[in-house]
Amino acid sequence: MILPWGQAHLREDRSCTFLDDQRPIGEQIEPEAHATLTPKTHLG
């Protein structure tokens, strides 16, 4: 799966931490984990 890292963050729901876009996703979350794709926004 290709994620738009330049426009979004991936956050692991249980720990609420954002994943590192330089590391494989499988190294950062457990099997059956849930994650949320959060758009990067500029509020100013």
Image (tube, helix red, strand yellow):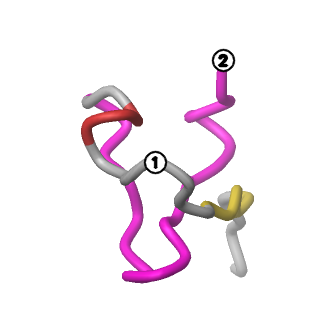
Q: Position of residue 25 (x, y in %)?
A: 40, 35
Res. 15 image quadrant: bottom left
Query: Do tag 2 and tag 1 residues touch (Cβ < 8 Å)?
Result: no
Magenta region, residue range: 1-22
Q: Residue at x 67, y 18 (%)?
A: 1
**Foreground label between 2 and 1:** 1
Is 15 magenta? The answer is yes
Is 39 magenta? The answer is no
Q: Quick one: label 1, few (<14), some, or many (20+) residues within 10 Å?
A: few
Position of residue 30 relative to residue 14, above or below, is above
Position of residue 11 relative to residue 27, above or below, is below
Q: Position of residue 33 (x, y in %)?
A: 53, 60
Res. 36 image quadrant: bottom right
Where is mark 1, residue-wise?
Answer: 31
Camera-side residue of 33 and 39 = 33
Q: Position of residue 35 (x, y in %)?
A: 61, 61
Where is mark 2, residue-wise?
Answer: 2
